[in-house]
Image: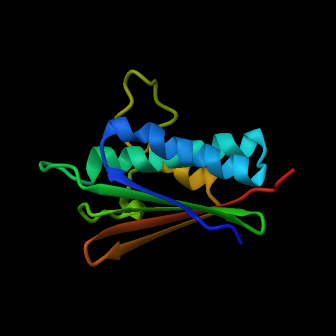
Amino acid sequence: MATPLRLTKPATPEHLTLFLTLVDVLCDRHGLPVEARTTLRLLVEETCTNVVLHAYPEREPGSLTLELAYRDGVASIVVEDGGVAFAPDDAPPPELASDWERRREGGVGWHLIRSQSDEVAYERLSEGNRLTLRKRVAAP
């Protein structure tokens, strides 16, 4: 098994590109198809953006760690942060039927994460959060 890719940076918007680049490295390393790259980038972008926007309210951003691995046709994404606890199951469902101009904010990111992942697992750690996503991805 290839060594997982791991990157830790402050949870700030300017580091999102680095986290997405890690997805590209994983996909290139394993020869994953374009569709897999697109889905994995979406999952990493939504997850990391949620950390950037919500994990460290009213204080300096802490760290965000992204770990990516691919084994036996499954890509795994693990995101850890030292932010406030959250409950993914409590995220409101998106109002997809409403007109976008009148739609309340929130829920679309979690809807995408859930609908594009084969497994979603959240753990509250002693000093933060760990979200693990798994996606079946066949290499060409």
Which image quadrant: the N terminus? bottom right
Residue 122 sits above or below residue 59 on the image: below
Locate residue 122, reporting x and y percent.
Answer: 44, 69
Residue depicted at 35% across the width and 51% down the height: 9
Q: Toward which corner of the image does residue 16 lie, by quadrant?
A: top left
Residue lying furthest bottom: 126
Locate residue 78, reporting x and y percent.
Answer: 50, 63
Residue lying furthest left: 58
Q: Toward which corner of the image does residue 38 lie, by quadrant?
A: top right
Locate residue 114, reporting x and y percent.
Answer: 55, 55
Viewer can see residue 94: no
Left or right: where 44 falls relative to 61 = right
Residue depicted at 22% across the width and 50% down the height: 61
For the residue pair 1 and 35, the one nearer the viewer reads as 1
Residue depicted at 48% across the width and 46% down the height: 19
Residue depicted at 35% across the width and 64% down the height: 87
Question: Number of numbered discs present?
Answer: 0
Viewer can see residue 28: yes
Left or right: where 91 falls relative to 83 = right
Left or right: where 43 falls relative to 73 = left
Locate residue 106, reporting x and y percent.
Answer: 37, 41
Residue 70 sits above or below residue 52 on the image: below
For the residue pair 118 and 17, the one nearer the viewer reads as 17
For the residue pair 89 and 61, the one nearer the viewer reads as 61
Give the color scheme: rainbow, by chain, secondary structure or one colour: rainbow
Residue lying furthest top: 101
Residue 86 sits above or below residue 113 on the image: below
